[in-house]
Image (cartoon, rainbow, N blue to C red):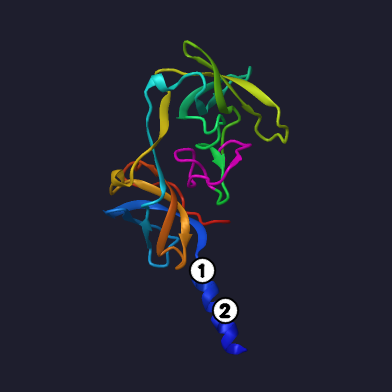
Amino acid sequence: MITAIALAALVSAASPVQGSVFGPVVSVKGTTFTITTSLSPTGKSLVSAGSARITEQATAPRSSLKVGACVSAMGTRDSKGVVAAQRISISEPVKGQCGAGFVRRAGGGRPPGTGTGPPRTGTTPRTGPPGGFRSGNFGFAFGSVTKMSGSTLTVKGRSFGSSSTKSISTTVTISSKTSLMQTVAIKVSAVKPKMCAFVRGASSDKGVTVKATDVALTPEASGSCTNGFRGAGR
């Protein structure tokens, strides 16, 4: 009986566990790369990304901001509810829906560039702003661009903090100072050292080695990766 229990525990311990790690890429070899992360017992994770979906945040041209695009706009909101965007992240709809690039994820955290945590994972639409401590006039709009007129956009999506499925429209204005970013799919061969990588996948050794299903890459900020580290359910 003791032997059977011990064997069962050993098998259970070796079973792959879903989770996530985040950190800077320090080396690349073929379809694998190594990141430094506080979530691995060794301080590093060897990531196998040959079959993973890999995306990167890149500067977006103004032409990518168009009707039908999915956007996540952050900035300041005036008394009329108009959001003056300081940053807009752009992605293409997935099966006609917005949500693939800006979603609430099972492991917690935030999309790249929206706060101090790693990107979220999963499929449930986000119902609140990115989090953290914001001033009272902080403005956020997420959804599909339904109208464009000069430097003014109309973004249709759900209201934050509401359980209602009713959509609302938010007016968003942009200026020459608005940062435009987009999520693009890349090949594993494009992964380079000094990129910041958020990795979702499975590991049977607590993150020392990870078989990735999704990898989200962002550039370093001032020579470092400023996002936090978070595992599944943390």
Secondary-structure class at tag 2: helix
Q: Is residue 67 above or below residue 57?
A: above
Q: Amino acid at mark 2?
A: Ala
Measure the alpha-carbon separation of dots 1 and 2.
11 Å
- Secondary structure that dominates the magenta span: loop
Precedes in sequence: disc 1 or disc 2: 2
User: Looking at the image, which is closer to me, 43 or 16?
Assistant: 16
Q: Residue at x 44, y 63 (%)?
A: 207
Q: Which residue is mark 2?
A: 8
Q: Is residue 127 above or below residue 169?
A: below
Which image quarter is the N terminus in? Answer: bottom right
Q: Amino acid at mark 1?
A: Ser
Q: Residue at x 52, y 75 (%)?
A: 11
In the rendered image, which quarter is residue 157 located in? top right
In the rendered image, which quarter is residue 137 located in? top right
Instruction: Indicate the position of residue 222 as horizontal and vertical percent values.
Output: 33, 41
Secondary-structure class at tag 1: loop
Task: Report crowding for label 1: few under 14, some 14 to 19, many 20 or more residues within 10 A (C-alpha).
Answer: few
Q: Which residue is mark 1?
A: 15
Q: Provide the residue span drawn in magenta.
A: 109-131
Q: Is residue 212 above or below residue 41?
A: above
Q: Is residue 132 visible?
A: no
Which image quarter is the C terminus in? Answer: bottom right
User: Looking at the image, which is closer to me, 228 or 185?
Assistant: 185
Q: Is residue 23 above or below residue 183?
A: below
Q: Residue most toward the top?
A: 150
Instruction: Indicate the position of residue 71 as horizontal and vertical percent values.
Output: 51, 28
Q: Residue at x 43, y 54 (%)?
A: 212
25 to the left or right of 149: left
Instruction: Indicate the position of residue 42 as horizontal and vertical percent values.
Output: 38, 67
Q: Is residue 110 magenta?
A: yes
Q: Is residue 206 magenta?
A: no
